[in-house]
Image (cartoon, rainbow, N blue to C red):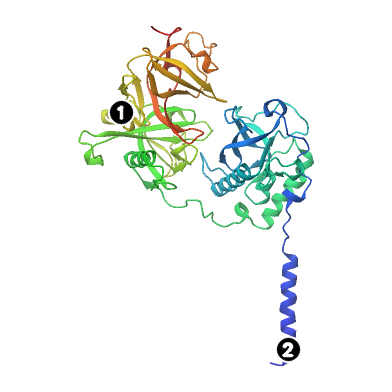
Amino acid sequence: MKKSTIIYANLFTVGLLISMVSCSPSYIDFANDSNVKLTLEYEGHDFFKDGIAEVELYNSIDGDTAHFVMAGDRENELIKARFYGIDTPESTGKVQEYGKAASNFTKEKLENANENGTIVISSPFFEYGVPEVDSTGGRYLSLIWINEEKEHAPIDELVCLNLLIVQEGYSWVKNLNEIPEYVDTFTSAEQQARDLKLNLFSGEPDPLFNYGDYVDVSLLELKNAVVNSLKDPSYENPYDGANVRIQGTIAGYTDNILYLQGFFDEETGSTNPEGEYAGINIFTGMSAVPTKFTTKNNYIQLCGVAEDSENFGFQITGVYSLPRVDINSNENDGKVLFTADKIDDSLKVHDFTFEPEELKSEQFDCLFSPVNLTEEVVVTGGYDGDDSLTLYIETTDGVALDYNVYIPFVYRPDPSNPTLSYRTYEDFVGKSFKVSGAIYNFHKTRSGNINYQLIPVDSEGFALVSETNME
């Protein structure tokens, strides 16, 4: 080949590369370079009164939801924030591709800002005012502003996390009616993520998503893993992230949580010569669940993702499907194998019975199972959540108990008066109650400790007995 031919060939290659580079979409840092900036001063303001405040991270839930408390007061009321204008793939309830990746991205940004910089939460408005809740009634529509390096950063040095999540391809844009000035920037950021094929727009499989088949796992195997985790925080749960198919009898349903129970003897894996009960809790998401999947003593099968959550402990999420009708159902759909009226006695739910002082922390034999207390208990105190109540209890003889009672629904003390309700923990204080069928569970506190609790499935499960403390 002639030297001139080689030169022309090389020049053509260089020109082609330049042309390819010039045609490739460039990356714009909308979050830092755009007009999406906080316009209201946050210092000295109260979120519940003004719709803006500096906050500290309580926990990061998923890609577009997090809980905060106002800065400097970890005991203040919890601010449950739903990030306005975005919609990331789900990572709890119904798990979706890139949901975990979005959740991890949001968590990393918030934890960095919480440890080293500044977090400010504001309503999606351009003036001070009482914040608004979303359609669930329990979460505040919010814009989240962060600086990962500077504490108490001035407002012009804060970045809108909502926009940053979109920009990096972890979310779709959704309903920006309240912030029309930012519509073009948010939509341009999403289009750029599509053009650059970032994350959920990549067209590639999600490396954090479990595409595998469901494996059959017993409730006992799951229970043993949970108990090991509770006893040893460093224990690595072998089922974490696994797609599992489980069977069990419905022991209760409340607050979007379904509880299953089963009995196991030596032939089915128990090391206890007398056999043992095992259970698990399943987060079913926020949508309505067909009654056949919430009816006590129906024996069911379902498929989901086992997840050892930092916030909620070990549970089953990502339930494949809970269909109302079984016709043409997928093999991984939830199924009612036996209805309550046809179930074998060996499969029926077992309610554990204890004297109040008998039930201790780490009573693992009744974990995720219904419990009846033989004696009444008295409420001595507690605290209010946004949509729940936690009650401290003692025996009628004044002995404090190792567990508390968690009320995740509107409590109605009088079945004959449906308009009467208890809305704060103070309504319960000094009164005695009968506990029946409450699920024995646990939760992680703000400090990372484990608290054990009884969760009534309805008001009848924590029945008012006396208006005054018993002597």
Left/right of residue 391 with respect to residue 7 in the rendered view: left
Q: Secondary structure at mark 2?
A: helix
> Residue 348 shows which numbered tag?
1
Question: How far across and down, in percent of the image, does residue 53 sit?
Answer: 69, 33
Q: Nearer the viewer, residue 456 or 362?
A: 362
Chain-order first, disc 2 or disc 1: 2
Left/right of residue 189 with respect to residue 103 in the rendered view: right
Q: Quadrant of residue 5?
A: bottom right
Question: How far across and down, in percent of the image, does residue 78 sit?
Answer: 59, 29
Q: Residue at x 21, y 33 (%)?
A: 274
Image quadrant where one finds the N terminus: bottom right
Q: Is residue 216 above or below residue 457?
A: below
Q: Quadrant of residue 115?
A: top right
Q: Residue at x 37, y 19 (%)?
A: 436
Disc 2: which residue: 5
Q: Residues within 10 Å of mark 2 (few under 14, many from 20)?
A: few
Observer able to see residue 298: no
Image quadrant where one finds the C terminus: top left
